[in-house]
Amino acid sequence: MVTSSVVITGAASGIGRACVALFAARGFGVVAVDIDKAGLADLATAPDSADGQSGDEGSPRIVPVVGDVSRERTGDAMVRTALERFGRLDAAVLNAGIGGTLPWEADGALERFDEILAVNVRGVVVGIRSVVPALRAAGGGSIVVTASSAGLGADPGNWAYNASKGAVVNLVRAAALDHAAQNIRVNALAPGLTDTALMARHRAVPGLVEASSRRIPLQRWGLAEEHAAAIWFLASPDASYITGVTPPADGGLTAM
Ligand code: NAD
């Protein structure tokens, strides 16, 4: 039986997947939420999974929940699963997100804007509303949202995504203020360019990785595992006096 549990959204890929591995390795029961059923199935057959039945007594467990984070029923299902499976909820990593901004005047740009806002902003609101009662029941807890450097300053040509992540940064401040008295901390991380499926289209452009890396003080893109480590810190008691902030994890770009 685990002593702590976390729900992680966007768990099937990239930063979320790295968070699942890290939290599970550190003894958390993990409810892994994603709209990508196949990606979660792959997680669920990992050795320490809920369904793998190969973990030793007391080993961490990973329980998949398939769902769209913008839907309240997904929020309800992930919290219910955590409580049924692990008996408590201590933390949430609200990480699911999409890109794909269309040019301002393109056909369908407004519909895409709505889709991006639904996942990146409404999905975080649904997540916070869903997990707070369980965190309160546990005496407090920690919520970490994956924002973006695009929420601290705008990337050209990425207006819809910029807007969504800017909203997340202020949402985190607001949620931190409103839940501080309940001993619930709310923070975000603002990753810069990171080598995940989200960036596959950009990575495929010849020379883009090299050119963009030259602009970054640390001279390279970030790794999902590096962001998972920072998210772990923000979620952990080591960050017990930190709430309402969104530190950049961008190789020094915002320092310029
Ligand atoms: P990714 O595409 O590898 O993973 C995102 C995951 O979210 C996928 O598994 C996807 O299926 C899931 N997802 C998408 N829509 C969903 C929905 N409606 N409901 C449930 N799950 C859904 O991308 P990533 O780079 O790991 O992105 C994770 C977070 O990091 C996102 O919020 C993204 O905006 C943010 N981010 C990424 C970068 C980057 O350069 N990769 C930079 C800054 C911020």
Image (cartoon, rainbow, N blue to C red):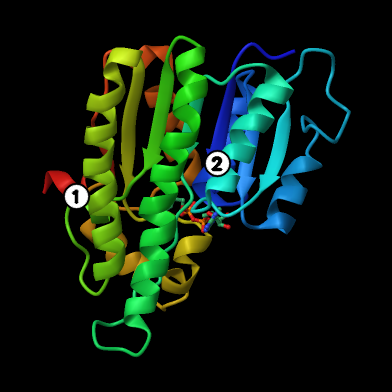
Ligand 1 near label 1 (Cβ, under 8 Å)?
Answer: no
Residue 217, relative to residue 2: is it above or below?
below
- Residue at 48 percent across and 45 percent down: it is 224
- Which residue is outermost to the left? 256
Residue 26, relative to residue 126: is it above or below?
above
Q: Is residue 129 left or right of residue 154?
A: right
Q: Secondary structure at mark 1?
A: loop
The spot of residue 190 in percent (x, y) is: 30, 44
Q: Is residue 74 left or right of residue 51?
A: left
**Image quadrant assignment for residue 129:** top left
The spot of residue 60 in percent (x, y) is: 71, 22
In this figure, which residue is indicated by the disc labeled 1? Answer: 152
Residue type at mark 2 is Gly
Ligand 1 near label 2 (Cβ, under 8 Å)?
Answer: no
- Residue at 44 percent across and 57 percent down: it is 119
Residue 250 in sight: no
**Image quadrant assignment for residue 18:** top right
Q: Is residue 70 left or right of residue 31?
A: left
> What separation in Å lies between label 2 and label 1 (alpha carbons)?
27 Å
Residue 103 in sight: yes
Number of the label disc, if any, that sits on residue 75: 2
Residue 164, relative to residue 78: is it above or below?
below
The spot of residue 250 in percent (x, y) is: 28, 46
Q: Nearer the viewer, residue 6 or 199?
A: 6
Q: Secondary structure at mark 2?
A: helix
